Amino acid sequence: MRFFQKRLRLPALAEGFHLITDLLVAELPELEGLRVGTAHFLLQHTSASLFITENADPTVRRDFQQYFRRLAPDSAPYFEHTSEGPDDMSAHLKAALLGASVTVPISEGRLLLGTWQGLCLGEHRRHGGRRWVVATLLGE
Amino acid sequence: MRFFQKRLRLPALAEGFHLITDLLVAELPELEGLRVGTAHFLLQHTSASLFITENADPTVRRDFQQYFRRLAPDSAPYFEHTSEGPDDMSAHLKAALLGASVTVPISEGRLLLGTWQGLCLGEHRRHGGRRWVVATLLGE
Amino acid sequence: MRFFQKRLRLPALAEGFHLITDLLVAELPELEGLRVGTAHFLLQHTSASLFITENADPTVRRDFQQYFRRLAPDSAPYFEHTSEGPDDMSAHLKAALLGASVTVPISEGRLLLGTWQGLCLGEHRRHGGRRWVVATLLGE
């Protein structure tokens, strides 16, 4: 049994929701050698999210964007934290609601997600830039 | 130290919130042999949730259902993802808000949850059918 | 590779959001000996949250409190679970939305959080009292 840990840099993504399973797996060739284990991913930011959602229909991810814009609107009148722009505090709220960290089981060299599950990056800033993910694989 | 991994099929559950700790533990006799470790559970679906909540009073789970119906209503006028029924997009949103994956510490052969904590399955579809959970135990 | 598990008792905290990274790390000197691994934290309660958020500006945490008071208000007219006080059911909802459990990668003896990330305790009760956290470190 062994750990493998790597810090991965994502490309800059537009505000919205993006499937990144393939992108992450491509950076982790060590996955293939693991018969059983767990893969942990931590997005090292507090204004974007990493979570699991539907991996097939792009309308799901567009609806997520519309929904979360309404659930945590920019520039709520009571916000005190306004110095970093109108989309900053709302981004922190969306990030906390959706989470920044996911654990996925590993089986026979691959992530054992459900057929319709994918790892999704929610970019909540207009100009979030390139984000960092720490991947920690443990397996045998 | 060793991994034990099993894919479990839940019974079909009605729309709403259901405690499933006992059901999961009953399928995992390997737990008893572990003095210390972690148990990871992944629900392999994107229209139901697996999370931790209060394990005693059924009114808590009924209030969850009422609350989440309001927080992520079916058939919001701006939804584009409508082809799979009025409860599908709302189910994806509830699933993302509550999460599909939980890690619980193991101590002396049992899940080390708090006294009032239970593992809860949120079934967000009217006819979700039987759901799959991957349990990955690691311990010694 | 070895597990280290400890049950930690937090001081009683006021309703609101509190950074507790330093407090947790101070109780875990075993962290320093781990070159690579994972740290799992479970808050053993269902009316408070443990999650990752911004670690620098106190206005972020005040805005969280205002936002979540609105998102899951006390005493919603349809709540059935009212016997434990007006802030109890709303606390269970906030706890489920933000989560009670976090896994953080370990690297070179410390938690590998992002520069602006901290572990945050959301106390959702007016008088929550002292809360328990189970820390489970695994590493080598």
Image: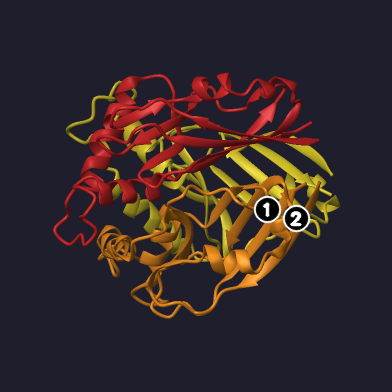
Chain colours: A red, B yellow, C orange
Asked if C135 appears above or below A58 in the picture, the reply is below
Disc 1 secondary structure class:
loop
| Residue A36 found in image quarter | top right
Q: Say left or right for B67 vs A77.
A: right
Residue at the left extreme of this rendering: A77
Please report, as a chain letter, where disc 1 is located: C
Residue at the spot of label 1: C109
Looking at the image, which is closer to me, C3 or B2?
C3
For the point 33% across and 75% down, which residue is it? C86
Name the amino acid type tagged 1.
Answer: Gly
Q: Where residue A37 sits in the image (x, y, percent)?
A: 72, 34
Looking at the image, which is closer to me, C6 or B94?
C6
Name the amino acid type tagged 2.
Answer: Gly
| Residue A126 found in image quarter | top left
Asked if C42 appears above or below B40 in the picture, the reply is below
Q: CA distance from mark 2 to mark 1?
A: 6 Å
Earlier-in-chain disc, 2 versus 1: 2
Residue C33: give its label. 2
For the point 77% across and 46% down, which residue is it? C140
Circles 2 and 1 on the same chain: yes
Disc 2 secondary structure class:
helix
Image quarter (top left, top right, bottom left or bottom right) of the N terminus of chain B? top right
Q: Say left or right for C78 vs C49.
A: left
Looking at the image, which is closer to me, B28 or B1?
B1
For the point 28% across and 27% down, which residue is it? A62
Q: Where residue B89 sits in the image (x, y, percent)?
A: 33, 32
Q: Say left or right for A105 vs C67.
A: right
Q: Where residue A131 sits in the image (x, y, percent)?
A: 42, 34
Q: Are marks 2 and 1 in contact (CB under 8 Å)?
A: yes
Inspect this view and state whether residue C49 appears.
yes
Inspect this view and state whether residue B111 appears.
no
Please report, as a chain letter, where disc 2 is located: C
